[in-house]
């Protein structure tokens, strides 16, 4: 599908939003949503006004990761328009398609329906003033990315990958999607997730389960910054299930890794 003329018309931009950061990955399951959630929380903890849009329409995970499943979403009338009021948790304004549909049925939607729903979550919601609007995009390259590129002026993209070869090959495609001359969205950098594993009883040891520094090498090769390396940590996995992103505890070892990532992005 051609990405020609994908950039939005200036009038379509959200007026109160200063920066839009698309968090992307080539492959699913590499921790894209985890990084997007923790990046948003870390930015909010640094004092920025932050919104997070779960645009991963076929696999929304923001409701669970922020423990706001089943949140009742209200509308308000503002300047003669009915606007969706985003939920808010840990200082981050949140919207997800998962608030409106049963995630099991969203997977049956046709592309057009999904794109329309997403456009509404962007343009018909009261996001207000935001320093950073973080987009958790679907894995890979899809119509949804085209919708996002057409609906918002994306400031830059952050690409998440594990160091595994099969993930790196897909990450490269993700970079190409943003970097071609038609779209021309700057790559803010790569994040190496699941970079190594350190067991609690052997704190000095690093086991490179998915390979060593593959994302670091890809960043060097593609001449883009490496924004951070996040190890495999059980608390990340647990926190995703429990609905409290680890970045909420900025002073913990793993929380500080996301704080460093947020500092590298701003
Ligand atoms: P994606 O958005 O790329 O599909 P997720 O963010 O949903 O990936 O992560 C997939 C799974 O891996 C989740 O269960 C998540 O909690 C877990 N996970 C992600 N990053 C880490 C990490 N660094 N350490 C441990 N578990 C992780």
Image (cartoon, rainbow, N blue to C red):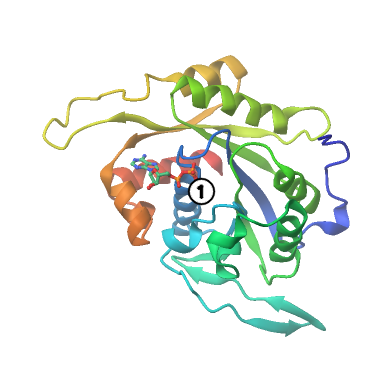
Residue 239's image quarter? bottom left
Q: Quadrant of the N terminus?
A: top right
Disc 1 under 8 Å from ligand 1? The reply is yes
In x, y percent, where is residue 129?
66, 66
In x, y percent, where is residue 55?
62, 54
In the displayed structure image, the side of residue 193 where residue 190 appears, left or right: right
Q: Residues within 10 Å of mark 1 (few under 14, many from 20)?
A: many
The answer to whether residue 245 is above or below residue 217 is below
Q: Nearer the viewer, residue 106 or 78?
A: 106
Q: Nearer the viewer, residue 133 or 207?
A: 207
In x, y percent, where is residue 20?
66, 50
In the displayed structure image, the side of residue 47 where residue 86 appears, left or right: right
Residue drawn at (69%, 34%) of the image:
186
The answer to whether residue 182 is above or below residue 95 is above
Q: Quadrant of ligand 1?
A: top left
Residue 17's image quarter? bottom right
The answer to whether residue 79 is above or below residue 157 is below
Residue drawn at (50%, 59%) of the image:
62
């Amino acid at each position: 599908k051609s990405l020609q003329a994908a950039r939005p018309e200036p009038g379509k931009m959200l007026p109160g939003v200063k920066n839009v950061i698309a968090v992307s990955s080539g492959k699913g399951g590499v921790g894209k949503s985890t990084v997007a959630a923790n990046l948003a929380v870390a930015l909010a903890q640094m004092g920025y006004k932050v919104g997070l849009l779960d645009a991963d329409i076929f696999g929304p995970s923001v409701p669970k990761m922020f423990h706001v499943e089943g949140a009742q979403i209200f509308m308000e009338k503002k300047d003669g328009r009915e606007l969706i009021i985003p939920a808010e948790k840990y200082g981050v304004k949140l919207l997800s398609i998962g608030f409106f549909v049963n995630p099991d049925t969203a997977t049956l939607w046709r592309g057009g329906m999904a794109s329309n729903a997403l456009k509404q979550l962007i343009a018909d919601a009261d996001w207000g003033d935001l320093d950073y609007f973080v987009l958790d995009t679907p894995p890979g390259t899809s119509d949804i990315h085209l919708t996002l590129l057409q609906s918002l002026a994306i400031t830059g993209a952050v690409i998440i990958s594990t160091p595994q070869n099969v993930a790196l090959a897909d990450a490269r495609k993700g970079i190409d999607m943003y970097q071609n001359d038609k779209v021309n969205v700057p790559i803010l950098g790569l994040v190496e997730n699941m970079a190594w594993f350190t067991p609690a009883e052997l704190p000095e040891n690093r086991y490179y389960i998915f390979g060593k520094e593959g994302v670091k090498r890809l960043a060097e090769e593609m001449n883009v910054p490496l924004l951070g390396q996040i190890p495999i940590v059980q608390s990340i996995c647990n926190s995703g299930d429990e609905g409290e992103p680890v970045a909420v505890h900025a002073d913990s070892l793993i929380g500080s890794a996301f704080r460093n990532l947020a500092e590298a992005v701003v």
